[in-house]
Image (cartoon, rainbow, N blue to C red):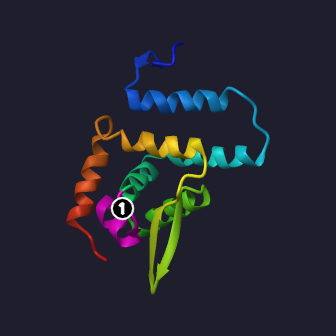
Amino acid sequence: MQDSDFLGQSLPPAHLALYSLIRIYYGRPMKTAAFNQVDRMFRAFSDPTRLRILNLLLGGELCVCDIVNALEMPQPTISRHLAYLKESGLAQTRREGFWMHYKLTTPQTTLHAKLIECLGCCYQDMPQLAEDSKALKRSRCC
């Protein structure tokens, strides 16, 4: 199988880069603390809701209510996914009164930076991301 093929289908360039990183990651054993961090990052990127949240956070810090309104999902669901992103090292929080604000962490590794870069290229391949960004502009609450 070539890197440009996945399950017999050609991959768009943005997905090809991510797929190549995954093949490198799973192609060799890693038994260090870094493995746990990398594993958590890949798991975070494997969920469509977390991808949508990460995409919104590319634009900067957001209150949880902004994310809830933009994605039209229940607050407990969004909070659970945000907690996972924080645990994986992809997001960080700031409390302001009763409100929690989230933003992307500064990439600490090349892999982290490349994953975020790949996400920024996915608009053409994942139209839902563009729709979410438009919804966010219409529904800011804080």
Magenta segment boundaries in residue numbering: 59-72
Tell me the quarter of the picture where residue 63 sits: bottom left
Image coordinates of residue 135 in percent, x first then y, are: 24, 59
Magenta stretch holds residue 85: no
Q: Residue at x 44, y 42 (%)?
A: 117
The N terminus: image quadrant: top right
Mark 1 residue type: Met
Tag count in the figure? Answer: 1
Secondary structure type for disc 1: loop
In the image, residue 107 sits, relative to residue 83, either above or below, namely: above
In the image, residue 85 sits, relative to residue 114, either above or below, namely: below
Magenta stretch holds residue 62: yes
Name, please, the residue furthest toward the top: 1
- Left or right: residue 69 versus residue 18 is left
Q: Residue at x 20, y 64 (%)?
A: 138
Image coordinates of residue 62 in percent, x first then y, are: 38, 68
- Label 1 neighbour load within 10 Å: few <14, some 14-19, many 20+: few
Image coordinates of residue 112 in percent, x first then y, are: 56, 46
Instruction: Check disc 1 and report the residue beneath it.
Output: 73
In the image, residue 82 sits, relative to residue 8, either above or below, namely: below
The C terminus: image quadrant: bottom left
Tell me the quarter of the picture where residue 120 sits: top left
| Residue 42 visible in the picture | no
Q: Residue at x 40, y 66 (%)?
A: 61
Q: Residue at x 66, y 30 (%)?
A: 26
